[in-house]
Amino acid sequence: MNEKTQKLPARLHNDFMKVWGNPQGWRALTIVNHTTIGIRFMVTGGVFFLIGGLLAMLMRTQLALPEQEIIGPELYNQLFTMHGTIMMFLFAVPMVEGLALYLIPKMIGARDLLFPRLSAFGYWCYLFGSIILLSSLVLGIAPSAGWFVYTPLSNEVYSPGPNIDFWLLGITFVEISAVSAGVELVVSILRSRTSGMALLHMPLFCWYILVMAFMIVFGFPPLILGSILLELERAVGMPFFDIARGGDPILWQHLFWLFGHPEVYIIFLPAAGIVSTLIPVFARRPIVGYRWVVLAAISTGFISFGLWVHHMFTIGIPQLAQAFFSVASMLIAIPTGIQFFAWIATLWTGRPVYHIPMLWLLGFLVIFLAGGLTGVMLALVPFNWQVHDTHFVVAHLHYVIIGGMLFPLIAGLYYWLPHFSGRMPSDKLARWGFWLTFIGFNMTFLIMHLTGLLGMPRRIYTYEAGLGWDLPNAVSSVGGFILAMGIAMILFDIILHFRIGRPAGVNPWHADTLEWATSTPPQPYNFISLPADPTRHPMWTETSLQATIAEGRHTLSEIDHGRRETWGSDPVTGKIRDIIHLPGNSWLPFYAALVLSVLCISLLIRTYEIALIALLISLLLLLRWSWINGAHPGAAPDARVKPGYPPLHSRTFDSPGLWGMVVTLFSDGALFLSLLFGWLYLWVIGPNWQVPDAAPLAWTTLVIAGVLLSGAAYWYRRVLQRLKAGDDHYLQYQLWGITTLGLAHCCMLLWIWTTAPLMVTHTAHDAVIAVFLAYLLFHGGLAVIVTGLQAKRVAYGYVGKSVPYEVAVLEPWWLYTVGVFWISLLVILLLPSAWGGM
Amino acid sequence: MAEAHGGSEEPGKAHLLDILGGGLLAISWLLYLAGTKRIPATFQQKWLFHGASLAAILIIIASLHGWMDRSAAWHMAEHMWLMTLIVPLYLLSRPLPQWLAVSGRVGRKLFKSLFYLTRNPIQAAFIHAIAIWLWHMPGFYNSALIHPGWHFTGHACLVFSASIFWWSVLSQRNSTAFLALLLTVMHTGMLGALLTFSHTLLYLDAHDLQDQQLAGLIMWVPGGLPYLVASVWFSMNWLKRNASR
């Protein structure tokens, strides 16, 4: 008896590893498992952090003494641009995403994220995009217009050469990775929680990540659009940001900060999530005001989208607007205050123990508070004007970002180190690391406030002696090196602990959340059996959870079918709805990202023939990827499940794919809204906006094209409704019919575009219309291709009455395509006459 | 430029809007009072209704003084006051049972068809968005300033679509309603931003650029607040409901 229970976990483990195990050698590139991908994200982000830090060290060396000539102005410009870009785009966002990808499934009791191949694809896009961007630094042609690359400085006239192109293409590539991770996190959190984990039983970290993921989904598209427009202006000469031809450089600033302000909270919220996870564990009591903290996180996300204007106080916006946004900026203090008080109250009423992570949390509380206070100062317009573009702003943003993101992140790293490695860090080295970092940081940046108040502008490569800036700069530089020593100490500690750290054992911090119920380090399958979780603190209420999970005493521990499975649950209550079977390791994500990076490079060196070929190949790869699905032999041809279990998701209409489609369309919608904003902005505000005398597009043909499209979408809807009712007569032929109708629409649209007298390089008006047409054509074209593939899949028997879910996944895409078509038509054709009154 | 609300025409026609609006207000108020005789309303509901009606009277008073005639900012404040305060207050007081009690079969049929429009908050948000954008296009806005009839139609469109929107959002209070609020706060913010940053006078009743900027800012910032408050309130309600389960 005793022997049997001893043996069982080991045998279960072996069986699971046959399905979930990671390959070695070259084939490690095919791994899609979230644990591996999460660690890859974090390690890569860590490397970029060190590179970004190195650039900062170079700058501090240059500024340590007045009138130094170690680094010339051009290189200095590249250094500060790349430092900001690396830290924001290549370190901060991927790092918190990596942590979330690693932790979320474990915290919600799932075996993997719901789109594992997408996470692998996201990682490769991130890696290749970053390498392309960094190669510019090695080649000496790095972007040099600041990390927000304001136009007109960044346009073809003032920044000739490929420097800015590296930024635009590389960052867009990396951002696609960020958005895909955002979509994946939203859907995984909502649809794959273990049995009975209602939304309000989720660990707070999951709430924060949910809000962050939504913010990425809505917040990144404005910058993606802006980058595309600016790249089009630079490469093709479409004048979106050129005043002479009807554009407006300020539009870039709006698009950038529409993204940029939410971005601050995209990196702060996960950090606050770490704080809210750690403080209860170390205070040894549940968090005070769980619901208030959730509410604060949600409202922070909501408010952050309305405040972008306060980054633009000095560019000549109306004084009234400055006053309004100065006041509105104070709003954010309410949710931040709620969280602060919840943390303090938890510590106050708990019995805190001061392990290393707590030290970093206390450092966070102090520094972030100071950064918040200088933020309030900067929200006041007269003060903002006074210190704009000085080192005061530099000091403020480092207090906010290092204090608000890096300190909690390191606290989290120390906290989860035993989870990553199964070993504990060294207490002594860790304390040295903390104090060196804390002292070094404050020495660098506290004094920098003063440097700024004394009038030293940011982004200058040197300064004259005797202006009063010598001493504070010297102090900052010394502090910077102490900070670097602290970081080195932490790195040393982390590397060392893998070898000499003492074994951590089970749940070393006595934490309450499910990720500590895996083995440490975790196995690729996370849990042998999936526990029901009806409380907020599973590991506190059931201390033996790790053992019972490994023994297979909970649900879904069958593996003889050879499928990777996890529970699919109701988004609110967490009741089980279906079994989600997940795809396994594959080369496709790697190849697709590789070909996309070829596309990126060929756009950089402007060889458009290769770009076109790369685009076609990547499209083929992505379509092949979508082909292995449903009842395909590579997916889940056999849908038998244990009696009493719900069906596989591919045998239902409400699959994670549908949710992924809807969330992706939110992101797409945000992009479209940004495009509409750009169009209207130029129309109303562009100083030289020129409207041609004759309408550039004929409305009759456009309306006919729209009717064709609407007909196709309506037909598609009918087909799906019939399928839902169990009727699949002529499914294949109907899908072919819809494809033909859609194709006719696309051809008509293409014909309209090619015959229209659009002069895209002459006026911004025509350029934006061309972008609208391209956008519509892309959506219509993709709808046609994937519907045609569906028809083909019906012929192969991969899709049909028993495997219907893919048909439901595509419906929102059709509806969205119709929606944006008619909205575009309205604003392109009717706006001029509605505007006639002016 | 002060032709707004038909300032240059004879006074009777100029105040057509106020008279019509006042009349409608009085009728709905009287109907409600009659209805409470048959179907009693709670104290809170009653005062929400009276509060909303008083807020509506404020608009008529302001309009009689001609404040809206002289300034785009006042005019915008009036729009936002109508769309984001009076309408939701009315709907929160749930006056339907009282109105239906006295309006008979015709009213019932009318409201039934309205229900159809409010089924999906996103759809309702789209209807509202079309009305808002249409009537703030300079072409339509300015023709409304010149013809009191158009002006009345415009306000009716705004109030009607706002009712559909808030009705849908307030009755559902789910994640779709939350998204509808987000969408609305985004596009009204966009419109407000356009008005704020415009270098030219778009509206005939804007006496200078600052006036027009203020109009835009009123739509953008204070006008966005009710949506924010509603979404926070929904989240709070939702959290409470689910916690007690």
Image (cartoon, coloured by chain):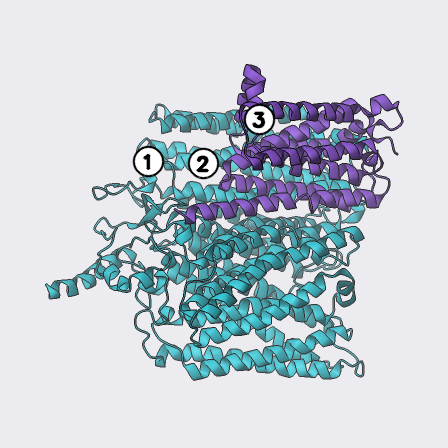
Colour in which chain B is shown? purple
Is B18 placed left or right of A167 in the picture?
A: right
Chain containing mark 2: A
Q: Residue furthest left?
A: A1
**Which chain is assigned cyan?**
A
Label 1, secondary structure: give it.
loop
Report x, y in % for residue A795: 34, 31
Residue A433 lies, with reference to residue A794, above or below; the image says below
The reply to whether residue A762 is in sight is: no
Tell me the kind of residue under disc 2: Leu
Which of the image's four quarters has the N terminus of chain A?
Answer: bottom left
Mark number displayed over residue A810: 2
Chain containing mark 1: A
Query: Which is more foreground, mark 1 or mark 3?
Result: 3
The earlier-in-sequence mark between 2 and 1 is 1
Report x, y in % for residue A771: 64, 41
Tell me the kind of residue under disc 1: Val
Q: Residue at x 52, y 67 (%)?
A: A344
Determine the image quadrant of residue A623. Answer: top left
The reply to whether residue A358 is in sight is: yes
Residue A214 lies, with reference to residue A785, above or below; the image says below
Report x, y in % for residue A713: 50, 28
Q: Mark 3: few, some, or many residues within 10 Å (few <14, many ≥20)?
A: some
Chain containing mark 3: B
Identify residue for label 3.
B36
Q: Residue at x 42, y 72 (%)?
A: A351
Label 3, secondary structure: give it.
helix
Mark number displayed over residue A803: 1
Q: CA distance from mark 1 to mark 3?
A: 56 Å
